[in-house]
Image: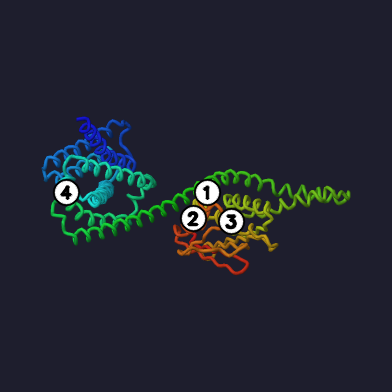
Amino acid sequence: MFLYCIMFLLYIISYAIDPFIWIHAYYTVFTPKYREKGYYVGAFLGLYAIIIVKQIMTFRGVGIASIAFFPIMFAYIIIISNLLFKGTFKANIYLFIIIYIVSIIVDCLVGGLWIISTNAANDEYAAIGILNLGITISARTVNLICYRFLLPLLSKNKLFIKWKGMYATVLFNIATVIPLLIIFYNIIGSKSEILLLALGVELLIAVLFSLYIAYTIYQKSRIQDMKNKKIEEMKSQLAFYEEKTESIKNLRKLRHDMKSHISQIMRIAKEENSSNVINYINALYLDIDIADEICTIDNLFLASIITEKKKHAGKKGITFQSEITVSIFPLTNQELTSLFANILDNALEATDRIQDGRKKYVDLEIFCEKEIVHIICKNSFAERPKRDKKGNYVTSKENRTNHGMGMLIIKDIVVKYSGEMTTFYDAEEFILSISFRNSM
């Protein structure tokens, strides 16, 4: 009696795993409509009751239970998902199919391993007992582990729902699951070795294909995360440059008067033969020259970016020259920051790695010709840039997780505005050329 109670308790716990996975997956992927969690607990209990009733009918030999279970559960989950979650009907069905396919494949794999290892008759597995309980606990545990690994992909940008490449995987797995369902639920005899071998090969292909797709999604997700981090950095720079524009406005107001005053002081210092004052003014003129160059840039936002990058270049001993004759761009301020900050950061970092005494320089030229904006950035570099198999430049920085997205972000902006981007390098110089139509 005690053993029977333990078995009953283990059955109850095992059958609660699948409804938990279903409700938790929908809760993770879609936005809940209500804050009251009691609704979602109720949805879990309703699905749990359906599964319990189905299992009781199966144990009592009601063969139709397994066949009728799928449409009943499908209808229940779709109705509940529409009532409790914000999501399209298509997305609801898509998520249902993914979870159901994983569950069936796990059942078949675990059940097959039990059959191979024990050589017991099929009837023994279908009846309440140690064998059936072992399969149930094993399959549900493996299903929970699979869900644990799938959860980050489900919760991260909803990639399973949004990425169209998954449709082929779902359809392929459906084709695999149908014959497995036939054998698993004993709708036809499963003694044919040829049939079992064919289904085994089909299942292996399905699993390998699914793993490949999952890995591809993971890679896309990782790259997107890196892009998002880079974009956040650009947003921080955007706020910084917005503050800088005010300083540049004030600088332009003071520039003319200050040059006149300093010229007068220089004349007096020379008359008095004051070498200390003369040296100080000469050093000061270096900053004034930079200010002069910055003040000739009509676009205040771009001027603030160039100002900051020139200061950074000066600290690194890099000669930074710019010639800018364009004041209006079709880009937003955020895009302007992302574009030029990444262009100049990449150029400055490549140049800064030179250790053999060669000249460190960055030259930026921006001009407009026949309504086409041209951006040309030239820089010296320590070593030739490397590309991956897809032709993308591979970062040589140590922190590959947080860096290396610069060129991809530049490319995204260029593509958005139907522009062109080309790169060229020889033994000493790297050239980045960008052009797009100025629609402003």
Is there any visible trace of residue 376 in the rendered image? yes
- Figure quadrant of the N terminus: top left
Q: Which of marks 1 and 4 is nearer the N terminus?
A: 4
**Residue 430 locus on image (x, y percent):** 59, 65
Res. 185 mark: none
Q: Which of marks 2 and 1 is nearer the N terminus?
A: 1
Q: Disc 4 or 2, which lies upstream in sequence? A: 4
Question: CB under 8 Å between callouts 2 and 3?
Answer: no
Residue under circle 1?
Answer: 234
User: In the rendered view, how is the structure colored?
Assistant: rainbow
Residue 90 seen in this snapshot: no
For residue 344, the mark is 3
- Amino acid of disc 3: Leu
- The residue to which callout 2 is attached is 409
Reply above or below: 102 against 354: above
Q: Where is residue 126 in the image (x, y as percent from the top left)?
A: 17, 44
The kind of residue tagged 1 is: Met
Label 4: how many Cα within 10 Å (few below 14, some 14–19, many 20+): few
User: What is the three-letter code of the residue carrying label 2?
Assistant: Ile
